[in-house]
Amino acid sequence: MIPVTEFRQFSEQQPAFRVLKPWWDVFTDYLSVAMLMIGVFGCTLQVMQDKIICLPKRVQPAQNHSSISNVSQAAASTTPLPPPKPSPTNPATVEMKGLKTDLDLQQYSFINQMCYERALHWYAKYFPYLVLIHTLVFMLCSNFWFKFPGSSSKIEHFISILGKCFDSPWTTRALSEVSGEDSEEKDSRKNNVNRSNTIQSGPEGSLVNSQSLKSIPEKFVVDKTTAGALDKKEGEQAKALFEKVKKFRLHVEEGDILYAMYVRQTVLKVIKFLIIIAYNSALVSKVQFTVDCNVDIQDMTGYRNFSCNHTMAHLFSKLSFCYLCFVSIYGLTCLYTLYWLFYRSLREYSFEYVRQETGIDDIPDVKNDFAFMLHMIDQYDPLYSKRFAVFLSEVSENKLKQLNLNNEWTPDKLRQKLQTNAHNRLELPLIMLSGLPDTVFEITELQSLKLEIIKNVMIPATIAQLDNLQELSLHQCSVKIHSAALSFLKENLKVLSVKFDDMRELPPWMYGLRNLEELYLVGSLSHDISKNVTLESLRDLKSLKILSIKSNVSKIPQAVVDVSSHLQKMCIHNDGTKLVMLNNLKKMTNLTELELVHCDLERIPHAVFSLLSLQELDLKENNLKSIEEIVSFQHLRKLTVLKLWYNSISYIPEHIKKLTSLERLSFSHNKIEVLPSHLFLCNKIRYLDLSYNDIRFIPPEIGVLQSLQYFSITSNKVESLPDELYFCKKLKTLKIGKNSLSVLSPKIGNLLFLSYLDVKGNHFEILPPELGDCRALKRAGLVVEDALFETLPSDVREQMKTE
């Protein structure tokens, strides 16, 4: 006898798969077990008991009349003896006699087998085996999608992730934080969500990212008092679950093999149900208790007609009717399954009820096999889908990251990273984090916040706690901002720096910072930037004074002209793209500083000469070869700083003498060979940089520059220095390294304020001891070979070494 437990391999592969079994699959499984028991019971009876019992039919033989009469006469002439009387010692014996067949046991067995094979209907013989086979096919069809390689791997992966999501402490916490809300709170939250979804633009709508925090319930914001409820290990496990769910969703939503497999196996079961009902209904009447058997075995048994009794006919008849009832119920259940499969859209799944119940409004709807499995799980327990949905929410993931960040970056740890930046502000730099820790907003002394390579930065309303915040730097960051935080930044932010790789990383809310004074943009822009609608909003920056664009612009954007009335400094740093159409510069009448760097300029733009308020001009890294236009600078009475470095200028025109207001002049990294004496008629110069040229001679007129504090001729071909240079007694920095000098004049001792001297790379054999008269010069400020430094007197060396 085969135990029923041996057929368990045809059921589900793992007990965990039960979550993908709706009630009809469970019901049909029980029906299958009942039908299997019928089949096993029938097969057992077939094996253990006699299948059929046959007896020959007696036929009276034909006898002649003479023999009969003789027998009669003999019987008549003979006087019958009276029967013996019973006595106490000889009791009467009664003998029971039947029909004599003269057949032995082997002949009866042979007859039974022959009649079983020839006379009994095949349905009556094989009914239990058919039941068993049909039931096994039903069981295989019901669980085939759990076994098929293309579907079982997805199911196993899904069940594994589902179990972890269901048991994750993060799921419990995320749902519990919204479970305490009463119905009024939920209704008001739903109304707010609907309003936020229908409003696309407005006074703040164009400035705040579409995924505003307004649509996120306040109870879903990180609660710092319960931050420790989730330890670091649990947080990391939940973080890994989010990544698994993302990858699994991308993989499963690509196809619908699970749905197709389930539909096909259900259709197959319905077809098989119809076949079973059809032939069983027609043949069940063939199971009869009495069967007539006519077989030609008279030579072996003496008989050819037999009357047989099918011993299990009555039981098989009852079992067949019972089996038909089970199959009918099974088939009706399968028909309902087909109705459910085709009536409902099972390849799409909406989490609308979860979004309404939990308030997590960004849970996305899913499709294909992912949706089908969620529909199946809902038939088992809708709570699974609800808990699983937490790991589909970007808001939930960001909240988890926020919680982990807050645990990792405590206020004390953040204060250790504070430093003073170039603007002399107390700055906190944060680089390559998963988000912005809420603990940042507890450092109230913070003046500058620098965020670099941080994705999905959310600036909450708590930024209002940073009363001293004036500067914000966003380098390759995508930023969303709360409306209350935007209001705070509009009033307090003075400096904004944005470095981006894509135009979409430019925060749209920056154009509404009405009190912003400095804006620095670094990133690749299109050549038609002037047509860019977003930059036209610069006109709303009424307080903007400094604008720096480091990009690839080919002309000055019209948006920059719109703020020209109050713009004081403009910097355009190109990547070598030629800057043309500079006539818009004429409109910037209040501009005091102008930098046009690496713009492939071949001449000084004429529009510059119209900037009467200009004080500083920087034309670094262009392609200037001739600067004859320099004579027009005489109209710029306020011009004090002129930087023409890193160009291809070969000579300095004598018109330079008309720029009497110059205080800082840089011609470094050019191709100048001759230094005209007219240059030194600009007697207000305090800073003069002529390094990295081909100059061989320094005119003695340099002594006229009595205000000179910085002078550099590094990396030239100068062979001697005029003594008049040492008349510039205010000189603090003197760079004469990498030349062809062989003697350093003792008159250098006249430079009492000299604090930095570079003489390295010359042909000096000895340094003058008069360097000791330069009291401000220390060893750290003297750039010279160690051997040459040893030529100084020991007292001078000791003097320089003392701080």
Image (spheres, rainbow, N blue to C red):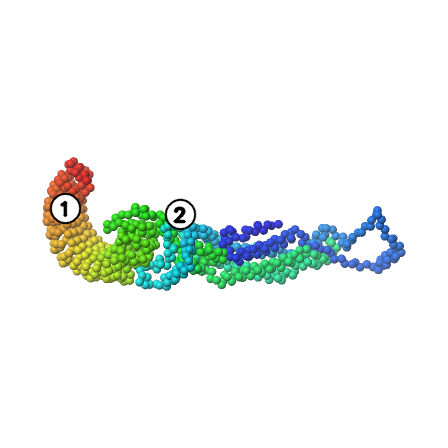
In the image, what residue occupies the spot 30% across and 53% down? 465
In the image, what residue occupies the spot 29% across and 56% down? 488
In the image, what residue occupies the spot 32% across and 55% down? 461
**Amino acid carrying mark 2 in the image:** Asp
Label 1: how many Cα within 10 Å (few below 14, some 14–19, many 20+):
many
Q: Tell which circle, 1 or 2, labels the residue nearer the N-terminal end.
A: 2
Q: Is residue 391 in view?
A: no
Q: CA–CA distance between discs 1 and 2?
A: 63 Å
Relative vertical location of residue 16 with respect to residue 777 in this rendering, above or below: below
Q: Secondary structure at mark 1?
A: loop
Q: Which residue is mark 1?
A: 731
Residue placed farthest to the top in the image? 794
Mark 1 vs mark 2: give the one in front.
2
Label 2: how many Cα within 10 Å (few below 14, some 14–19, many 20+):
few
The number of numbered badges drawn on the structure is: 2
Q: Which residue is mark 2?
A: 231
Quarter of the view holding residue 367: bottom left
Q: Is residue 99 in view?
A: yes
Task: Point out the image quarter for the C terminus.
Answer: top left
Q: Secondary structure at mark 2?
A: loop
Instruction: Please provide percent x and percent y for residue 441.
Output: 31, 51
Instruction: Please provide percent x and percent y for residue 436.
Output: 33, 52
Quarter of the view holding residue 770: top left
Relative vertical location of residue 647 with respect to residue 204 in this rendering, above or below: above
Quarter of the view holding residue 792: top left
Q: 344 or 219, which lies in front?
A: 219
In the image, what residue occupies the spot 44% across and 54% down? 387
Residue 498 is marked as: none
**Amino acid carrying mark 1 in the image:** Leu
